[in-house]
Each structure stands twice: as C-alpha cells, then as structure tokens.
Image (spheres, rainbow, N blue to C red):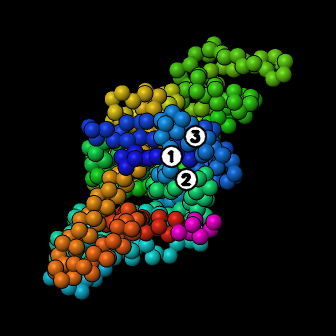
Amino acid sequence: MEEDNIAVGLDIGTTKIVAMIGRKNEYGKVEILGIGRTKSLGVHRGVVNNITQTIQSIQQAVQQAEANSGIEVEGVTVGIAGQHIRSLQHSDYITRNDVEEVIEDEDIDNLCNQVHKLVMLPGEEIIHVLPQEYKVDGQSEIMEPRGMSGGRLEANFHVVVGQISSIRNIGRCVKNSGLELNGMTLEPLASANSVLSQEEKEAGVALIDIGGGTTDLAIFKDGIIRHTAVIPLGGNAITEDIKEGCSIIEKQAELLKVKFGSAWPGENKENEIVSIPGLRGRDPKEISLKNLSKVIHYRAVEIIDQVYLEIKNYGHEEQKKKLIAGIVITGGGAQLKHLKQLVEYVTGMDTRVGYPNEYLAGETDKEIASPLYATAVGLVMDGLERKVFEKEEREQAEEEHLGVNAEQPEETAADHNTEGEGASHEKSPIPEQPKQPARPSRNVVEKWFDKLKEFLDNAE
C-alpha cells in the first residue's frame, strides 16, 4: 500500500519506460525506494502506437519497482511528451465589476478559464495555461496581482497544446495497466524541476532534454517558464544513422554509440578501429571510430541547430530575454561523449550536463542520479507535491467541517448529531476534495485533468 508521503513517477519514453517510487525524507530531499525499467515497446517519438505492447511494458516496469521497494503501486504521475506538443503565446483580459474590490484568486481563475476557451485546431486541446506576467489597469510587469485594486486585469500566457487523442491513449494505457492516474505533467517541466536550480530559472536558462525519440526544450527566465518546444529527433535518429552508415544491425549500432561514440570527430585518430562480429558466420566488420564520430556529429549538429532556432524564436538575443545561465542538457542523449562541447560550439552559450542529484537524498544510488532518469525523478517530485497539497486540502476541509459543527447552537445539536453520524459514514468526500481545482496557478490544468479522468472512466 502506498503511504501519504510516497509518490510514483511513470516516464513513458520512446526507448524506455521507467517506474520510480520515492518519498521525501526529514531533510526535504527525495529518497528513491524502488525503480523499474523496461524496454519501451509500442511508443514512437513519444506517442503510443501500440496500446497492448505499451501496457505490457508499463506493467513490467511497475512490477520491477514494486519488487525493489516492497511497496504496492496504486497511482502514478505520468509525463506527457511527443511530437504533437506545441506551444503559443497569448494575451487576454477580464473587466472586473467592482473596481474597489481587491483582486483575488477567483479573478485569476476567471482569466485562466477564458484562455482555456481558445479555439484550437481540430483534435487539439490546451494542456497547460502558464501565466507570464500581469497588467492591472495598464500597469505592466506585475508578477503577483492578488491584493491589488483595478478594473481591468490582463495577462500574457504561455499555452501548451497537444493532440487530445495521444494524451487519452497514454491515459488508457495507465488505467488498463491497473493503475490510478494521479496526475499528468509535461515532461520538459518535470525534467526542469529535477535538474535546474531556482537561481538558474531566475537568471534565464534553456533546458534541453534529449530522449530516444524526441528532444524537449523548456526555457525559463525570471523564475517563469517562457517557451517550450518538442523537436521530433532524438538519440534513436543517431543510432539509425550509424546503422545505415556502417551497415550493421540496430543492436550493434546502439552499443557502438554508447561505448565508442563521440559528437566531436577531431577527438579520434585515423587508426582507431573497432571490430564488430559478423552475422551468422560472416567475417567481422571493421569500423573506424573517426567515421563513427562523423556520422554522430552530423545528426547531433542537426538536433542542436533545431533547438537553437527555438531559443532564437523565444528572443534570446534581446537584452531583456538573455539566458544568463546558458543551456543545461539532460536525458539519455546527454551522456553522449563531447556533446556538451559541441552544444557550446554551435550555440556559443555556457552549457552543463544536468544531473537530478540536487534534490535527491545523499545516499541515492549513483545510477539513479543520471541524466537518463531526470524526467522520472521530476515526476516523483511532482507526485510528492500533489500528495502534500492533497493532505493540506483534506486538513483544511476537516477544520472547516469541525468549525461548522462547533458554531451550531445548542438547541440544534440533536439534529446535527444525526447529520454528524451520516457524515462519519460519508468520510470519503473529504479525501476526494483535492480533485477540485485548488491552487489558482494550476486551476485550469486540474480542470482539464478531471475532464480527462472522466472521459477515461466513461470509456471503459
């Protein structure tokens, strides 16, 4: 059974599916209790294209994590990614009836809900509505409008959009695996939470998460997410190039990339050669490491160029939008030798490899604190945050419930007692409370998530 302070992250990737169980220790760090990892079958470029195979892979990963931790997994926080994700900037406003009344959560909710009604392309739906900064009666650059007075409340939004069918398919896979869907988070946001510091987000940073099928980008400035993008190329494209360029099978190509691959051809000497066993008694194949590096280099440059184009589209060259903290690369692809140097060379920006160790407990296994697991760690962190929030909501609801009972006059105590008895049998509505939109900043996301859960329940 899962406890209140335990959360499970499920990273459904193109090459691997990871189930990670974690909890917060007394120092506020994340302690990983168990991990399961299986080859991802049925997912292409972040999109499910075979439900049955994906369900099997999820179940295997979850069973491994359960065996490692001795904890039975009930609900999971899932990451959303894939080439169907896109983002856009949008400005909107509301006119308030009472100018003298201060701006409250309700006003911000109304503004966010208005953005949620934007008409999208057929089959698309808004996933995240992320406020950038607000304006109150024309006064700009307001980060926190609550408590201010004004008639016109305006805001710039970063809106993340995705194909609803792709997202529903992920939801179906999770539910058909016998798991409860506790939450969904955009994978670049989950990776950012696990590898970036608050100082980097304030200074301005671009997070590049290089996965198997896609490369995700998330740009932060002044502590706020400013731009997201998904490039439909990842580590698998490099493996495919090696396979074609060296005329070898995929398994050998992946092994070559991991063991001997480099994104910088100048590092290898002409006479460095590796021998690959031939198929079914054929002669071994000799491959020059310099040629291998050239193949990797061309594809890596193409991926970096596309990401850098997105960084330019955000407006990195403008003084106000400058990314002082540069670039952080993470994900399985970030482990490619000399990739950091290549990113610095192509973009001219400071670069580091992002490890999810800042928020992990000190005794965590070194393998888990690898860029490979950045998204999974971020999803666990997101799940833990939800659990804390749900607990606070429950306590608040109970306090309010007790407060109402305490305020009843004595003559109606008998009547209330009967209601109290009924309430004691119907305690379940209180834990259900967190499903309602709660945090103003996540209000729209929670409503959308509730709609998705309702759809999945009805679809069964």
Query: Disc 1 on helix, strand or loop?
Result: loop
Q: Please state which amino acid type lies under the numbered disc 3.
A: Gln
Q: What residue would you read off at disc 2?
A: 179
The Cα–Cα distance between marks 2 and 3, rounded to whole angstroms, is: 12 Å
The residue that disc 3 covers is 63
The answer to whether the residues at label 3 and label 1 have Cβ atoms under 8 Å apart is no
Bin the neighbour count of mark 2 within 10 Å (Cα to Cα): few under 14, some 14-19, many 20 and up.
some
Horizontal and vertical percent position of residue 15: 61, 40
Using the rendered view, name the quadrant where residue 171 is placed.
bottom right
Instruction: State the image coordinates of residue 85 (x, y, percent, origin top left).
Output: 53, 58
Give whichever of discs 3 and 1 has the lower sequence position: 3
Q: Is 458 within the magenta?
A: yes
Check disc 1 and give the amino acid type. Val
Q: Position of residue 187 (x, y in %)?
A: 47, 50
| Residue 359: quarter of image | top left
Question: Whole-percent x and y of residue 8?
Answer: 46, 46
Q: Residue at x 56, y 19 (%)?
A: 268
Please name whichever residue, 417 or 127, is drawn nearer the observer in this view of the structure.
417
Res. 91 in view? no
Local SS, label 2: loop
Q: Is residue 230 left or right of residue 429?
A: right
Front residue of this view, candidates 245 and 105: 105
Highlighted magenta segment, given as a residue range: 454-460
